[in-house]
Image (cartoon, rainbow, N blue to C red):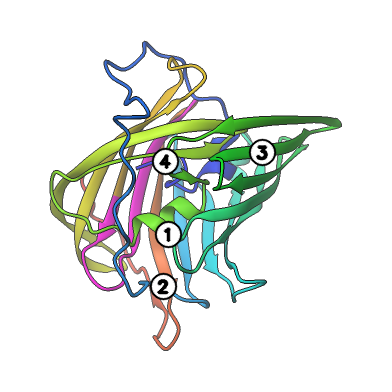
Amino acid sequence: MTVASLALALLAGHAAAQPAPPPAKVPTDAECRPLPALKLPLSFSPGEVLEYDLDALGAQAGKLTLKVLPQKNGALPVEVHAVTNTFFSKVRRVKGGGTSYLSPRTLRPSRYVEDATENEVRKTADVTFRSKDHQVKVVYTIGGGRGETEYRYAHDGLDVVGTIYLMRQLPLKEGMEVCFDAYGIRRLWRVFGKVAAREHVSLPVGEFDTWHLSGQAVRLDDHRWRREIHVWITDDERRLPLVAVGAIDLGAVRATLNAFTRPGDKKARAEGKENLKW
């Protein structure tokens, strides 16, 4: 439900979103209410690995992997890695990853770092979150250039990777509204939407009852830049993010879970052809 929740920041995130007329209403700071208390215990733990197929332009574009790492210095790191395949590399070559350092208690980030190469240009970002004053400091490089910027978020400041894991812990119910600010592509975005419905999803990796979250991500400094986002999360104790759909400058991009490994469980992998209708 966020430009971040797709975890496509490394494939699509570095591409510019398409400018469009501003949405009818972007929540103000007062209207963007704090997120509710998380549903505990956590649905994931160190050792969980989620593997996704990425599709764009009507064809498979690459792979994306999410990993929960062991706690380090009081933080719970979660890592994303994305790489385009030979076909999509003719359009855009991307390889890289990012790591979000989350509070094991609140799942809010203290730091987010990423390092990716797009069409032979290396792009990095080191992002720090200061919860005391709601500040986000970004130090980034593009090729040989370096820049710094700061933003202020309203109530909840998240990043492109940690958002996925926090969403898994929300007490989802139909009609529930969600609003927060998320860092991505060297900008801060206001992400807002709602739980659209409870839906059944059939994938090669299994049959699932899910919550469908639908929303938009709008750049806080320029409301003309926005993305529509859809995410399906399982309605069970695992809270698996099954599918995420968003848009880049080339069109719609979809991430679909094809395998997952959880501590103590046998690896589940997709077989055959998926059957999720849009």
Q: Which mark is residue 44?
A: 2
Give the label on residue 230, or none.
none
- Which of marks 3 and 4 precedes in the sequence? 3
The percent position of residue 255, horizontal first and vertical second, equals 41, 49
SS state under label 2? loop
Q: Secondary structure at mark 1?
A: helix
Residues at marks 2 and 1 touching, judged by CB atoms closer than 8 Å: yes
From the image, tell me which residue sits under label 1. Answer: 165
Q: Position of residue 102 (x, y in %)?
A: 54, 61
Q: Is residue 235 magenta?
A: yes
Residue 137, labelled with which disc?
3
Number of numbered callouts drawn? 4
Q: Amino acid at mark 4?
A: His
**Of pointers 2 and 3, the one earlier in the residue sequence:** 2
Q: Would you name the residue on which mark 4 appears?
A: 155
Q: Residue at x 28, y 52 (%)?
A: 232
Q: Is residue 153 above or below residue 250?
A: below
Give the CA distance from mark 4 to mark 3: 16 Å
Question: Where does the image place residue 169, in percent across and percent down from the top left?
Answer: 33, 62
Tell me if 43 is positioned left or right of 154 in this view.
left
Mark 2 or 3: the one toward you = 3
Q: Residues within 10 Å of mark 4 (few under 14, many from 20)?
A: some
Residue type, label 3: Lys
